């Protein structure tokens, strides 16, 4: 598989993927390994496990390193995808100070490698930089509405600070940066116990349990399938003069209640909807304006929610939930 896909030698890049054992990172590593690149996956396994990349361990162009990006590391690479950071609210709120350190100290450490090696570095930023947005759909020029002292701030403000660091390393040190603002993404290999809406609803539907709608379910999200997302970030890394920030997401917007209804229908579940309290600072509406991604990357998502859910539900049916554990208790 790998040999047939090998590009000519000078096209092969040495690529570091931080958070490479996670949901998005492991699929990105898989894609880059298939393209023949030399891939270094670096992860502290806070929200992931080695099994996500077990199928890559025998590939000669893949290496796995257990490392926490809040500590410096010395590597020689051509490209860095900086994905390391817990993404689900329950995960990033588990140790909020560590979440902030991961975005800030982790970004400084990775930008340091990029500066020393002259590597191109991509930051996985987030729609959360817009907070609970007053502008709809969200355009990149919107500066956002984040509660800086709320329970989501460790993530939102951490990612905002990371964007600042990326732009300052770019302006002050000429580092070749890329920033993508990722909107809610789902798909096979997402952590089944991450507490996020897609994984909760699918697990509950398959087990015939009540589906937990937080609030009245009228809040919206726009869900992007994993494969579409990874296509976009590879395109962004390959672009020679567009640094972003750019929104990457699926502009099809659904209420949380509509999502629950689709999951029930596709999985053929008899689960009922129940309401639970809405968490603090939960954004009311979220939908990306992807005009910039279309124009600069020629990218738009291809997978409709129903098709993506079908693939994700099939994956949930194929796994053994007892293989997955909650976040590492000694995460400090
Ligand atoms: P994930 O939790 O599955 O992956 C994150 C990975 O980073 C995990 O493998 C985790 O163990 C690792 N990690 C966390 N802290 C680390 C540290 N200090 N050092 C080294 N590794 C560390 O989440 P994901 O959904 O794959 O998200 C990947 C990236 O994309 C994150 O930066 C996230 O903020 C961003 N993002 C994701 C979404 C989404 O909907 N999935 C939306 C917006 C942004
Ligand atoms: N949500 C829900 N039930 C759940 C989990 C989440 O209704 O079991 C809601 C949550 O309150 C939010 C939306 O679904 O309005 C998306 O939540 P998620 O944690 O997936 O991601 P967010 O976009 O809020 O970071």
Image (cartoon, rainbow, N blue to C red):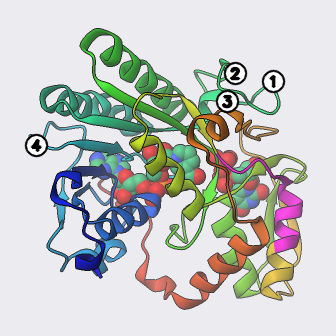
Quick check: 89 left or right of 26? Answer: right
Expressed as whole percent of the image width and height from the top left, the position of residue 300 reads 67, 50
Q: Secondary structure at mark 2?
A: loop
Numbered tag placed on residue 145 in the rendering: 2
The quarter of the displayed image where residue 175 is located: top left
Nearest to viewer (mark 4 / mark 3): 4
Residue occupying image coordinates x 59% and y 29%: 129
Whether residue 151 can be seen here: no
Specify the farthest residue to the top: 172
Q: Is residue 323 left or right of residue 11?
A: right
Q: What x and y, as percent, mark residue 83? A: 39, 47
Disc 3 target residue: 131
Q: Is residue 114 or residue 85 the one in the foreground?
A: 114
Which quadrant would the N terminus be assigned to in this image? bottom left
Q: Quadrant of residue 110?
A: top left
Percent across and percent down for residue 323 are 41, 83
| Range of magenta residues | 249-262
Secondary-structure class at tag 1: loop
Provide the residue designation for mark 4.
Answer: 76
Residue in front for this viewpoint, 286 or 34: 34
Q: Earlier in the sequence, mark 1 or mark 2?
A: 1
Based on the picture, tell me whether residue 258 belongs to the magenta stretch: yes
């Amino acid at each position: 598989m790998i040999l047939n896909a090998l590009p000519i030698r000078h096209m092969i890049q040495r690529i570091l993927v931080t958070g490479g054992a996670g949901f998005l990172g492991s699929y990105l590593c898989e894609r880059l390994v298939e393209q023949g690149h030399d891939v270094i996956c670096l992860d502290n396994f806070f929200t992931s496990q080695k099994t996500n990349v077990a199928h890559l361990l025998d590939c000669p162009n893949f290496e796995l390193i257990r490392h926490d990006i809040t500590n410096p590391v010395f590597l020689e690479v051509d490209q860095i995808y900086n994905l390391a950071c817990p993404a689900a609210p329950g995960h990033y709120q588990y140790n909020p100070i560590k979440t902030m350190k991961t975005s800030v100290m982790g970004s400084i450490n990775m930008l340091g490698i990029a500066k020393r090696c002259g590597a191109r570095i991509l930051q996985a930023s987030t729609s959360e930089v817009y907070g609970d947005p007053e502008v709809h759909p969200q355009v990149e020029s919107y500066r956002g509405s984040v509660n800086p002292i709320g329970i989501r701030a460790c993530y939102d403000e951490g990612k905002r600070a990371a964007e600042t660091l990326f732009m300052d390393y770019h302006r002050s040190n000429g580092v070749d940066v890329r920033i993508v603002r990722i909107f809610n993404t789902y798909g096979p290999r997402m952590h089944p116990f991450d507490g996020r809406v897609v994984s909760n609803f699918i697990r509950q539907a398959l087990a015939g349990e009540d589906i937990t709608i937080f609030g009245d379910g009228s809040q919206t999200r726009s869900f992007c399938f994993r494969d579409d997302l990874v296509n976009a970030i590879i395109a962004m890394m390959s672009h020679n003069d567009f640094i972003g920030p750019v929104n990457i997401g699926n502009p099809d917007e659904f209420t949380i209640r509509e999502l629950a209804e689709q999951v029930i229908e596709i999985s053929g579940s008899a689960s009922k909807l129940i309401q639970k309290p809405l968490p603090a600072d939960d954004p009311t509406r979220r939908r990306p304006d992807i005009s910039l991604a279309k124009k600069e990357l020629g990218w738009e998502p291809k997978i409709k929610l129903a098709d993506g859910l079908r693939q994700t539900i099939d994956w949930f049916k194929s796994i053994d939930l007892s293989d997955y554990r909650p976040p590492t208790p000694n995460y400090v």
